[in-house]
Amino acid sequence: MLQIRCKNNNTTKSFPEGSSLLEVYKEFADELQMPFPVISAKVNNTSQGLKFRLYQNRDVEFMDARQGSGHRVYVRSLCFVLYKATQDVFPGSKLFIEHTISRGYYCNFKKKNSESLREDDVERISQRMQEIVDQDLSFHREEATTEEALRVFSERGLMDKVKLLETSGQIYSDYYTLGDTPDYYYGPLVPSAGYLKVWALEPYHSGMLLRVPDWNNPNVVAEKADMPKTYSMFAEKTRWDIIMRLSNAGDVNKAILKGHASELIQVSEALQEKKIVQIAEEIERRYHQKDNPVRLVLITGPSSSGKTTFCKRLCVQLLACGLRPYSFSTDDYFVNRLDTPKLPDGSYDFDNIEAVDYKLLEDHLLHLMSGERVEVPEYNFVTGKREWNGKKIKLGTDSVLIIEGIHALNPILTKKIADSLKFKVYISALTSISLDDHNWIPVRDNRLLRRIIRDYNKGAFTARETISNWGNVCKAEDQWIFPYQETADVMFNSALNIEFAVLRTHAEVILASVPKNCPEYSEAHRLLKFLHFFLPISDKEIPPTSIMREFLGGSSFSY
């Protein structure tokens, strides 16, 4: 008999060898009284599907769709149901699950006959999805040699999966089937389609929006948010993918094997620089317009987007346009640490807008824009106090102010300044590469990897500490950054197509240091798992002005 400890209630029970997680859960269910349906579990801090069988003593923690790993299992399984439905209704069609948007997942869809997607087409696909859920079709995991898996996908024309597995270096590859439809997923699925009660599918721009459960209440579909500017930024990303001829990990790996890594880096950097030049030229145009000329540039974005390097590169281009930029961060206007608001656990909430003396900041901005000289503070992060060291500023001819910080687009920060005088920039690392057509890489994973590497290189935090704090970072972004991103005049994508191949070289050793006996190991294991799909390359070709240097080190900018 096995000894299985349930971490949800710290109770141990005996089970026959080979028991499934689903069988184990049924024994604990009455005691646990889980508020929402269980979707998956962590076994020794590694995510597993409920069909996973136990052959040794293990710690088990059951998850619902509110937890990250449970939510991913739910969405991943739902995507498979969507894919099967498209194949059943439109045989030979192509489905591309591209990115998260509007609290759902944008899906591009191509019929075999190249006809445009119609509203009634989406309804037919949705109806077929509901039939699959009602039939409670089972998901089956197939273990096969990579050669056999390649044959299965090649026969069906799924070349995105062929390229991925060909370059994975694996002897064996698991894939899944739902009825007679095979597909590949790099993480576990729910046992059967009947688990997927909460979802919706609707037309969205030229494709479809797959709507999924709300993170806080998985019994309802997440409320949709209109995000036209974010959609346009993703559309621009797709155009760049076409230019680069890269859309998935297999494409990247094939290009690396052909010796094109250096060229890919150069083109990716050139595309970013071109976009920065366009932004600088638009600021210059609006600076010189007769009515309401722009005098204040506001730059924000979530953690590890590359805001600081972007700001410095934009300043260079503004100088090239004949303007004199003066930039500073909202960080210097932090209130003294003792006055900083706190989180429920008693720790300081540095991401809260009340952690910034925004009234003083706005007052200084108004005086500066009126041509007055202002003494500005400098925040001492060691003492936790704001200091006045005689640093005075006065804007000269052709000067433009640039403010960078997580609250830069929050209207409370500059409510007394007319919007016509502002130019707002939102920057984020919108992951430019998917593993294949049905396995996207979450945007937050891109930024989390950057932050792990930067924190480690600076000696600030271990990978375990960074992962542990990431949940608080995400909550702060949801509250203080994302609500204002659609107010931006322009959006900038700081991710590179070749990025994960470079990050793997740095991240592998750092992530491997996370102990297996801690909760953070689950996330470290997951990140390592998808990074291994990318062939590693050196960062020696990454230029010193690159946004990536902010995280890898070796930047020519001072921070």
Image: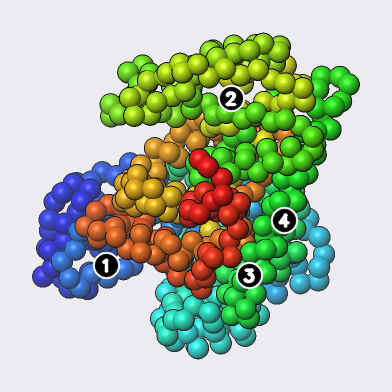
Q: CA distance from mark 3 to mark 2?
A: 39 Å
Measure how far apart labels 3 and 4 are at the Cα level. Answer: 14 Å
Residue 457 in view: yes
Q: On the picture, is 67 further left or further right than 295?
A: left
Relative to 392, is 539 above or below?
below
| Relative to 183, 116 lies left or right | right
- Image coords of residue 102 (percent x, y): 62, 42
Query: Which numbered mark, 3 or 4, is in the foreground of this view?
Result: 3
Query: Which residue position is annotated with label 4?
Result: 271
- Of mark 3 and mark 2, the one earlier in the sequence is 3
Please report the residue visible at 67 percent of the width from the left and 26 percent of the height from the top: 401
State the residue at coordinates (50%, 54%): 554
Q: Are marks 3 and 2 in contact (CB under 8 Å)?
A: no
Type of amino acid at the residue the image marks with label 3: Ser
Mark before the other along the chain sequence, 3 or 1:
1
Disc number at residue 20? 1
Q: Residue 138, relative to residue 519: is it above or below?
A: below
Task: List the residue tagged with mark 2.
Answer: 410
Q: Residue at x 69, y 52 (%)?
A: 272
Helix, strand or loop for disc 3: helix
Of discs 2 and 4, which sits in the foreground? Answer: 4
Label 1 – label 2 distance at C-alpha: 49 Å
Label 4 CA crowd tier, 10 Å (few <14, some 14–19, many 20+): some
The picture quadrant where one finds residue 293 is top right
Q: Nearer the viewer, residue 423 or 329?
A: 329
